[in-house]
Amino acid sequence: MSNIAARYSNSLAGVVPMETTLHIRSGSGSFLETESGERYLDLATGIAVNALGYRHPEVMAALAEQAQRHLHLYGGTGYQDVVIDFAEAILATVGPQYQLFFGNSGTEAVEAAIKLSRLATGRPGIIAFRGAFHGRTLGALSLTASAARYRSAYEPLLPSVYHVDYPAPTRLGLTPNQALQETQRQLQTVFDNEIGPERVAAIVVEPIQGEGGYIIPPPGFLEWLADVAARNGIILAVDEVQSGIGRTGRMFAYQHTAIRPDLIIMGKALGGGLPISALAGRRDLMQAWTAGTHGTTFGGNPLACATGLATLRTIEKENLTAHASALGNVALDILGALAELPQVCDVRGQGLMVAVEFSGENGPGLVRQLIAKALEEHIILHAAGLRHEVIRLMPPLNIDRTLFTDALHTIARLIAELSSNR
């Protein structure tokens, strides 16, 4: 064991698994550099956090400028330009009918959505989906259903939370239309047998499941959910923690449809690399929160607001949503042929949320081998899926086209080689 690994083991709880043995010194652009001077192309970006890669000059300049002012100020102390500038920039991407609440993490934004939904409706019930990941604190964990190990031994969890299957065709072994019909049937069964819709406060859904395997739902899914919610006075909350901030070719994944969610949950890339989250809610819903009924110490931290604002401005200035969409198509073109392999059951993606799913019992093993082989090629990959049978690609939105294309060809070659050995 290396010296740094031994120090980690001695001082830090082992609850966060170490996925590589890299001793990382710094990052620049799309690359991480180790203490020994080796460079690795990072296609995981801190699990979709570093939307502009590492040390982007606009982000670093914004950080330095704000650091010269102050590092932290509780939001209720007084008015700050950087906070309202950031808030207005976010609202410009979703519409003027929303207001914001800033938190520290995606999990905290999910907790806020749960609290606000129950407060505003006076109802207890929450509907979520199997395969979902919404966080690890007890309220958010009650909605998470992507791994039993996340939930086991923490029971009892939040009551009145009900799960139905996400319409995931490969997971359910159904066609996209059949998967949608199965989800619709299950939700109706919940309404008929477990909790009436008039007692449901919110439906919380990922427009594209992240941890669950980059599952893109069948067309019409979100529209159907929005209709169910509207007809029954239920709040529709979309969890855009991983799919938001330009990753899918739109600022938010729900914007590929015509729906208007009641709540939008944001996190991860929102702060340009610093921790911050936001809950955007319809103005009438947000007004249910009277002064002091919810709060935060660090939410809306000015450093994170500054870097987040620089990130949003850069995405707009450099038209990175279009870049993400174009590179996503490149990825599907290059990796799509892998679907002919018996070991690969699906290649899918929306913008720069790209996934290759492996088939059968050997799927998780193939993913582990692929991650190891890619690391030998100085490429960092990350797993997803309920059994870790999926490789997900989440590179910086501004990654160079040639660099990404070359990496995709390497990944395709490694998958073909691993499959031929089976």
Image (tube, grey):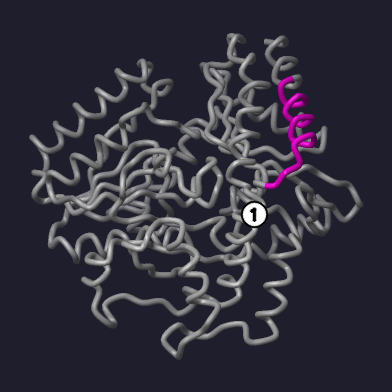
Determine whether 307 is above or below 201 in the image: below
Residue 27 is left or right of residue 10, and the answer is: right
Q: Position of residue 54 (x, y in %)?
A: 74, 56
Q: Which residue is mark 1?
A: 50
Residue 44 is left or right of residue 401, and the answer is: left
Name the one closer to the observer, 107 or 205.
205
Tell me the SS state at disc 1. loop
Name the one closer to the observer, 165 or 156.
165
Q: Position of residue 235 (x, y in %)?
A: 22, 53
Determine whether 200 is above or below 382 in the image: below
Kind of residue at badge 1 = Asn
Q: Position of residue 410 (x, y in %)?
A: 77, 26
Dominant SS in magenta: helix
Give the magenta part as a residue range.
398-412
Determine whether 305 is above or below 347 in the image: below
Identify the residue at horizontal 18%, vertical 40% (top origin): 228
Identify the residue at horizontal 68%, vertical 81% (top origin): 67
Name the quarter where the C terminus is drawn: top right
Q: Position of residue 150 (x, y in %)?
A: 43, 47
Q: Is residue 311 magenta?
A: no
Identify the residue at horizontal 47%, vertical 52% (top origin): 241
Q: Is residue 411 magenta?
A: yes
